[in-house]
Amino acid sequence: MLQSIQTLRALAALLVVFAHFEYIKPAVGGFGVDIFFIISGFIMAYIVNKSAEGFLYRRIIRIVPLYYAMTFLSAGLYLAKPSWFRNLILTPTTLAKSLLFIPYHIKDSGPVLTLGWTLNYEMFFYVSIAAFIAIFGSKKGMIACLIGLSVFVLLSAFASWENYMFRFWSSPMIMEFVGGGILYYFWQHRLRSASRSLRNALIVVGFAALVFLPYAEYHYGLATQRFLLFGGPSLLVACGFLCLEDRFNPQNKIHSTMVLLGDSSYAMYLVHPFVIYAFLRLVYTRIGMQGPVLDFLGMVLSMTLVCLISIAMHKWFEKPMVSLLRSAFDKQFEPAKAVAGN
């Protein structure tokens, strides 16, 4: 994967962690999710262009193990200490819907793992890609998917869905995935061969967009025209980062660390609430540390701990689990590859 995209994934994850730390009020950094969605659209188009073989299967084994682990951890903690959770409603139905990526909303409660709302969008996007690939083939299928989702969101703007699932799936936020997919084709056919002056201009525009995003979230919040106010600038940020690709140096410690954090960004996204809660509320506050300087120190320490645990989870849980599942199921879901390998 491109080092620029992996670095941007790290930045997006760190922004979300910062937002949930709530060091600034109102919190800033939630727009990292919008950057994630842009990146996801780009990466899925990138993957399909390379090989669409077993696409949905590969996405499931990449997403499910850690998500299920964190969902069951949330459920277990809720059963042990329900006072730790403000809005969680745990029933067999809500647990099943959470595990099946089915959106629901009951008294301000969504998935058992609250962060799972973004994965409900992700899985809808993956299933849509797989469906269009099955109908149109790999290359045409991805383009057809981007067009189909755009039409679906556009038509839904004139519909009044009574079903929460359809209201959720037809959200304009879906267009952030579409935007990321379009960015891939722009990068593939134009941006990679663009002049240095054009790329420099796009880097400046991307940096300006990155500065605008926290300003917009602080002053307007994420609920105000989210796709236009945050999706569009996030697309410009991703475009600017792509223009930096040839400036990344794998031997540079900062660059390589950011790429490693990008590789671990999924773990960081799902794990960080547990780490922040455990460190700040169960440890930090109990030893009586208060004040601006100590609050800042607590933020730095907790974010450092999040990064270290995320890297550990990526290396010692995610990667081994994906390898284990692929060794068990590749022959069933990717028969062409299995035959070629024999």
Image (cartoon, rainbow, N blue to C red):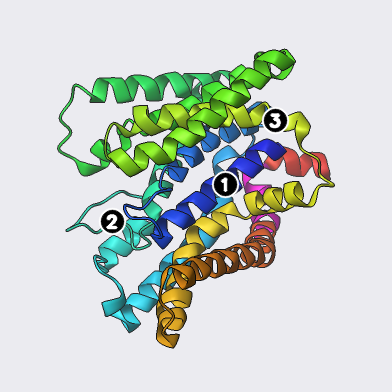
Give me the residue at 60% from left, 27% from top.
Answer: 240
Q: Which residue is mark 3?
A: 244
Q: Position of residue 120 (x, y in %)?
A: 39, 47
Q: Secondary structure at mark 1?
A: helix
Picture quadrant where residue 281 is located: bottom left
- Residue with the mark numbered 1: 11
Considering depth in this image, is 304 or 126 the residue closer to the camera? 304
The amino acid at mark 3 is Leu
Question: Disc 2 to disc 3, how far (Cα)?
Answer: 38 Å
Most frequent secondary structure within the magenta stretch: helix
The boundaries of the magenta stretch are: 325-334
Look at the image and tell me in which quarter the C terminus lies. top right
- Please tell me whether mark 2 sits on a helix, a strand or a loop: loop
Q: Earlier in the sequence, mark 1 or mark 3?
A: 1
User: Mark 2 — residue?
Assistant: 110
Horizontal and vertical percent for residue 96?
Answer: 33, 60
Asked if the stretch drawn in magenta spans residue 202, the answer is no
Give yes or no for contact between labels 1 and 3 (Cβ–Cβ under 8 Å).
no
* Residue plotted at (76% across, 49% down): 256
Image x and y of residue 243, in percent:
67, 26
What secondary structure is marked by label 3?
A: loop
- In the image, what residue type sits under mark 1? Leu
Q: Residue at x 28, y 67 (%)?
A: 92
